[in-house]
Amino acid sequence: MGFGLRKFLIFLGLAAGALAGTAAAQGKEGISFLGRQMIPQIETGNGYFQVRVQSRVIIRVSPINNRDTFGRKVPSSDSFSEKKARKCYAMSQFIGFRSGGGGKENLELLTRDGTLVRAYLSDGCLSREFYAGAYMERPADGNLCEDRDIMHARTGAKCEIDKFRLLVAKK
């Protein structure tokens, strides 16, 4: 049960309690708690109630092995060299990831068009913590950016992305 749903259910419980209090005030049966009759009341004098609805979007990214979700073979990390990359990528572009080569503190993110982007993780984060998958909370702009966004491993680790590097085939 999500945090927002929990608040909504508490709100419904308060509303049900208010209805029970109205019924008790009209001479109907109230609520019994530990053998004592209780009449719940909500004062509505000059006060007002406020309900805030928030939405939260979580993007899940699955680990890949040697083939992407479209069945294409993904080459090994050794056949690529790094180039400078953009600072932000649209989260909707990513279809999978794998543990990065050339170090244990990076992940290789696969995009829908077959491009590989290496994401270097902050100090103390190991790519092996992401073996079960990862998820990211989608910000308002919908982008995954370096030095801003955090990737959450399904194992519980949280890692900030330090920088991106584009992987291009060696010639």
Image (spheres, helix red, strand yellow):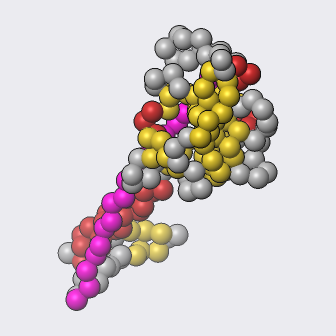
Q: Position of residue 46 (x, y in %)?
A: 22, 89
Q: Position of residue 73 (x, y in %)?
A: 59, 11
Residue occupying image coordinates x 31% and y 67%: 51
| Viewer-side residue, 40 vs 122 | 122
Q: Is residue 24 above or below residue 129?
A: below
Q: Residue furthest bottom?
A: 46
| Viewer-side residue, 165 vs 50 | 165
> On the image, which quarter does residue 43 sit in?
bottom left
Q: Taking the image as drawn, is residue 58 in sight?
A: no
Q: Main secondary structure of the magenta part?
A: loop
Residue occupying image coordinates x 45% and y 33%: 93
> On the image, which quarter does residue 76 sit in?
top right
> On the image, which quarter does residue 119 sit in?
top right
**Drawn side of residue 45 relative to residue 129, left or right:** left
Q: Position of residue 6 (x, y in %)?
A: 45, 56
Q: Is residue 120 above or below residue 66?
A: below
The magenta segment is 46-65
Q: Taking the image as drawn, is residue 75 in sight?
A: yes
**Drawn side of residue 125 relative to residue 54, left or right:** right
Residue occupying image coordinates x 36% and y 64%: 11
